[in-house]
Amino acid sequence: MRSSSGDFSLKEAIILTDGILMKKRLQKSRYISGFDGVRTLAVVGVILYHLFPYNMKGGFLGVPIFFVVSGYLITDLLLQEYEQNGTIDIRAFYARRMKRLYPALLTMVLTTAAFITIFARASLGKLRDVIINNVFYVYNWFQVANHESYFDKFGNQSPFTHLWSLSIEGQFYLFWPIIVILLLKFVHSRQTNFDIVLISAFVSAIWMIILFSPNQDPSRIYYGTDTRIFSILLGAALAFLWPSTKLKKNLQSGPRLFLDGLGLGSLLLIVWMFFTMDGENDLLYLGGMFFFSLLAMLLVATIAHPGADIDRLMSNRVFSWIGKRSYGIYLYQYPIMIFYEQKSSNLADHPILNAVIEIALILVISDLSYRFLERPLQHFDYSRTFKVLKEVCVKDSPYGWKRIWAVAATLIVAVAAWGAIDEPRASVSNGDSTTLQNVIDHNSQEAKQKNKVVSSQKKAQAKSNSAASSQKQEQSQKKTQAKAESVDKNGKYVLTDAERKQAQQLPVTAVGDSVLADASQTMQGLFPQMYVDAKVGRQVREAIPILQDLIRKGKLSDTVLLSLGTNGPFTDNDMEQIMHLLGPKRQVYWINVQVPTKRWQDQVNQALVSAKKKYSNLHVIDWHSYSQNHPEWFYSDRVHPNVDGLPYFVNFVTHEMLK
């Protein structure tokens, strides 16, 4: 995200480049204070989306707002430069962009890498690649190549996920000045240039539609430069027809009211879409994001016009403060959230309080970055680098206590380099998380083999087909089953012979996420006719096409077990689709969630209670209440039952299904 490209005034346009003060550069530039308000709107949307992804559903759309603003301001400045000087100094342009963006980016990446190396070694995987790809602004394609999902809100999330947008902007900055020069030299009409850029934006949007596949993770088209560049191009196209220095300040009441209405209407629609547009909604990728970018373009156009009132509406001290720091706020917000939430054990109990603390940390760190890093280095003469370093090291240094920054920077770079070099060995040793992953992987493979048996067996063949499995698997299942059946010494939830026989004869279809994957082998030991489809990171809505496929193949049993909601809540429409597919005759058992480290725990469980009142065949298994006072039953993530807790989980779920 480049929230800084609009931080241009006449003073900032006079830039020291290669020791020459370019006094004639962009003499007519005007600082548009309303763009600070637009940046504030965008960065607030992004932060609230990351904090409350299922309340501020469309907050991620702050990114295309930044894109549109960036495209407009950069292109507007390039056009001004060409008009005044008859050319564009591409080298100086690159220098300005690097001096504005690189210091904070490298500081954030290296500081985060150092923090991971010391305090969060479970996240060391591919750290070297992350650093390199961000340095060269191609991180978004790294995420595509590694099939990273932007919408997976659970598991070992990367603190670098949000940097994809910076890479897209970096790629834009690399090629756009050259393209602008070619357009201006060979196409002299601004209208024609507008048409060319606008058509290019349409092509990008259409490419997004072509690549989109329903019921699949949309992260490829979400991260791709080719499918997201249309937002930047819309802003760039606007600059050709709407130059900020040539717009009339005095307008008649009619045009002025029209612009005000257009700006206010687009602003209200943007805010509305922040609350309603889901990131995994098909409509978003079938033109919705392009429509949103058009709204952002209209808002930018009305703010840029000095004759309209929207600029004043979006200008105040708060917006100015946040807007000027929005680049740093965007950079630091995600790692701060990730690391804070990894160390917090009560997010579900105090979601608002924890959110306030996180926001405060983000603002403080971003302000320090703006004051002591971004602003000084933006105007620093890098030709003096070696001289400054030499002065820092002498005994009577003129920099005094400020030398501590040099020491801190050296330590950060050294530790980050250590983490990047040490990552292959260190990433193997992740303790509890590695054990859990191995268990899930093993159980998933066992479940696939068992599913083949369940799919092919007949009622009378259940026992014989189960016995056909490997001797090692059979012994493991017997041991786990025996432990599960005798776990409660007080006799509660111990299965009787009749219940065990009932479980062995009951066909069950189970669909779930990693919690079910963790328990699948033990569950299939008690329910030999259970078909399991479990996947790490699965959202509730992803179960819909799975259930449709099972129904089409005639493999859906009359008893259905669902273990979903660990990775995020669901909408009423999701629940309605699932229950409609299953029909009123099937008995549906849904295990609620124990996920105290995520804000949506109570939201999921309350939604299940409400759904239970609506659907008579829906039975909620209250695993949360049963287990919440037993942290010893779980791995360190406090979500997945460990070896000791698994028998409690399986026995409780089985008892609830059979009673």
Image: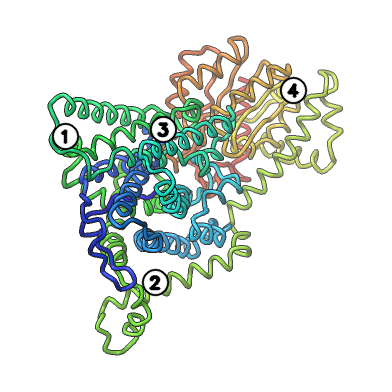
Q: How is the structure coloured here?
A: rainbow
Whole-number angstrom distance, CA of label 3 to CA of label 4: 42 Å
Is 425 left, or right, of 160 in this rendering?
right
Q: Which amino acid lies under the numbered mark 4 shown in the image of this protein?
A: Lys
Q: Name the residue under label 1.
A: 309
Q: In which quarter of the image is residue 211?
A: top right
Tell me if 215 is positioned left or right of 92 in this view. Answer: right
Q: Which mark is residue 501?
A: 4
Q: Are the residues at dot 2 and dot 3 in contact (C-beta closer than 8 Å)?
A: no
State the mark number for residue 409: 2
Please indicate whether residue 242 sits to the left or right of residue 654 in the image.
left
Amino acid type, label 1: Asp
Q: Can residue 4 be seen in this view?
A: no
- The answer to the question of whether label 4 and label 2 lie on touching residues, with beta carbons closer than 8 A, is no
Q: List x then y, in percent, for residue 446.
A: 75, 38
Which amino acid is tagged 2? Ala
Quick one: label 2, few (<14), some, or many (20+) residues within 10 Å? some
Q: Which residue is drawn at 22% across and 42% down?
A: 246
Mark 3 and mark 1 residues within 8 Å of each other at the beta carbon: no
Q: What element does badge 4 sit on?
A: helix
- Above or below: residue 17 compared with residue 88: below
